[in-house]
Image: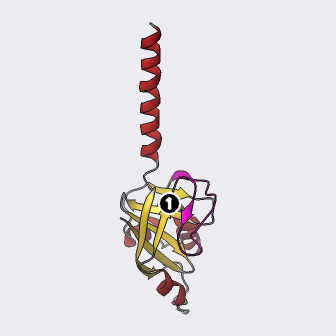
Amino acid sequence: MKFTGIACLLVSLGIAGTALAGDQFYVGSWTFTTAVVAPWADPQRKPDDTERARLMGRAVVFKAREISGPRPFACARPQYKVTDYGPDMIFQGAFDEMQRADKKSDPKAIAASLGFTGAVIKTLETGCEIDVHFVDETTAEVGLNNYVYTLKKR
């Protein structure tokens, strides 16, 4: 009886561990592959290209207790939280703000122009000022200084 209880406990812990590991789909190395001017950027002012040039081809590594990579993505103590957002709330609500300023702006269409599909977009809040929005399991996007950067998982 005691052996059965211990076996059940170990199996339960194994399942829980697998579930937790499964939740950390973002862990690993991600490389900046492309950048486009963000939809919310002022069309009259071209964003500074220096940062974009510095980030292209560089890697960000999400670890359990650290994010390594170029500034401003490196973070010594991330507080990860995975949240599901609608298209209006990604990029810190930028598409919602665009719609409030112009009722013809459609957050879902704007998100689709960046590769997002569906009504729910998985987002990793890092607690380090950068949110990561997932197009799919191997493609993520981040907004920074009027650019939307695409990262691909390696």
Q: Is 79 colored magenta in this rendering? A: yes
Quarter of the view holding residue 66: bottom right
Judged from this view, the residue extending furthest toward the front is 3
Q: In this rendering, is residue 86 above or below 8?
A: below
Magenta-drawn stretch, dominant element (helix, strand or loop): loop
Can you give x and y, in whole percent of width and height, for residue 136 in the image?
36, 59
Q: Secondary structure at mark 1?
A: strand
Q: In this rendering, is residue 68 above or below 19?
A: below
Quarter of the view holding residue 130: bottom right
Which residue position holds label 1?
62
Quarter of the view holding residue 111: bottom left
Can you give x and y, in whole percent of width and height, for residue 6 in the image?
46, 17
Instruction: Using a 10 Å C-alpha cutoff, classify the residue at mark 1 as few (fewer than 14 neighbours), some (14 to 19) or many (20 or more).
Output: many
Q: Pick whichever, 45 or 141, lies toward us.
A: 141
Q: Is 81 colored magenta in this rendering? A: yes
What is the span of residues highlighted in magenta in the rendered image?
64-83
Residue drawn at 53 percent across, 52 percent down: 64
Can you give x and y, in whole percent of width and height, for residue 27 in the image?
46, 56
Can you give x and y, in whole percent of width and height, for residue 8 in the image?
43, 19
Left of 70 or right of it: where is 114?
left
